[in-house]
Image (cartoon, helix red, strand yellow):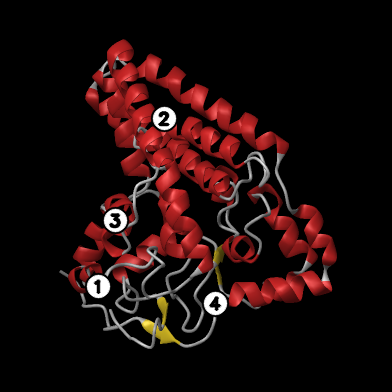
Amino acid sequence: MGARVSRSDFEWVYTEEPHATRRKQMLAKYPELKKLMGTDAKFKYIVTVLVILQLLICYAIKDQTWPTIFIFAYVCGGTINHSLTLAVHEIAHNLAFGYSQPLANRLFGFFANLPIAVPMSISFKKYHLDHHRYQGDSEKDVDIPSGLETKLFNRTFYKFIWVLLQPWFYSLRPFFVNPKTMTVLEIWNIIIQFVFDFGIYHFLGFKALAYLVIGSFMATGLHPMAGHFISEHYMYVKGYETYSYYGPLNWLTWNVGYHNEHHDFPNIPGSRLPEVRKIAPEYYKCLPSHHSWIKVIWDFIFDPEIGPYSRVKRITGNKKEN
């Protein structure tokens, strides 16, 4: 089953998360960073093209063999759907229509969510904003693996299974760790998604729907693009809790790899995050970063120094817990 992970607990700290402090310092030194904030006009059109492209592929693939469905779902459909999940991430920060039009952002989130086939845009926003506000919080940051995950997936083979099933853990963990009351918009998200999925099944058949569902789960599990889930906050260098990735897959993921930059300025769209690093390079060049999401996944699985416990956690209410 491989070597047991050497860590037996999280990295507990008493300090505040680093991003608010760094943001304040950077804005004082480089006020021109404020000009990067706002929306990217091209974003909405690119998302629309991706949604239409998935519909066209559904039509083209509806009568193909199952091996072809799985291959296309992993290579093509999954990649597009993963890109759309990260478009939902941008929308969660109101970067489609701006902070003055929250409902327009939520409705566009429904639209971007459609090919993903699983309703997630509203629930994701509800929990993801907590991840930004309370990074590392032992109760509120549901991006951190649960105590059960850290105890079960602590050897090479088990970590492989954890990576493979990562979309399930990532999706279901919030409802067990920090359950919240379902909102009206979440109910509408579910209804709209169900109607869309039924429409795909009714008009294009089960294989077309399977192409979307299988692609979503395969591309957020053992897939090169899914490396960002691990690379963003798992502690590969002691004491550092957020990591950026500067490789080519940023082109497909709205620059989510610029993750230190994103946490420092969540109201700057992904297309402009490289500009943050160009304007203020001294704040980022000294931080450890990744250059391959495939290597991130490989190291997570095979390096006994890294595992679900490799996260920074903050004390909440003077109580330390797993």
Residue 111 position (above or below residue 64):
below
User: Which label number is shown at residue 175?
Assistant: 3
**Horizontal and vertical percent for residue 247?**
57, 56
> Of the residues tagged 2 and 3, which is closer to the observer?
3
- Which is more N-terminal, label 3 or label 2? 2
Answer whether residue 126 is visible to the viewer in this image. Answer: yes
Separation of marks 3 and 4 at Cα, in angstroms: 24 Å
Separation of marks 3 and 1 at Cα, in angstroms: 14 Å
> Of the residues tagged 4 and 2, which is closer to the observer?
4
Q: Nearer the viewer, residue 50 or 24?
A: 24
Residue drawn at (34%, 81%) of the image: 10
Residue underneath mark 2: 115
**Horizontal and vertical percent for residue 235?**
44, 75
Residue underneath mark 4: 17
Q: Nearer the viewer, residue 293 or 244?
A: 244
Asked if the residues shown at circle 4 and circle 2 are in contact, with their CB atoms under 8 angstroms apart, the answer is no
Task: Give the quarter of the figure containing the N terminus.
Answer: bottom left
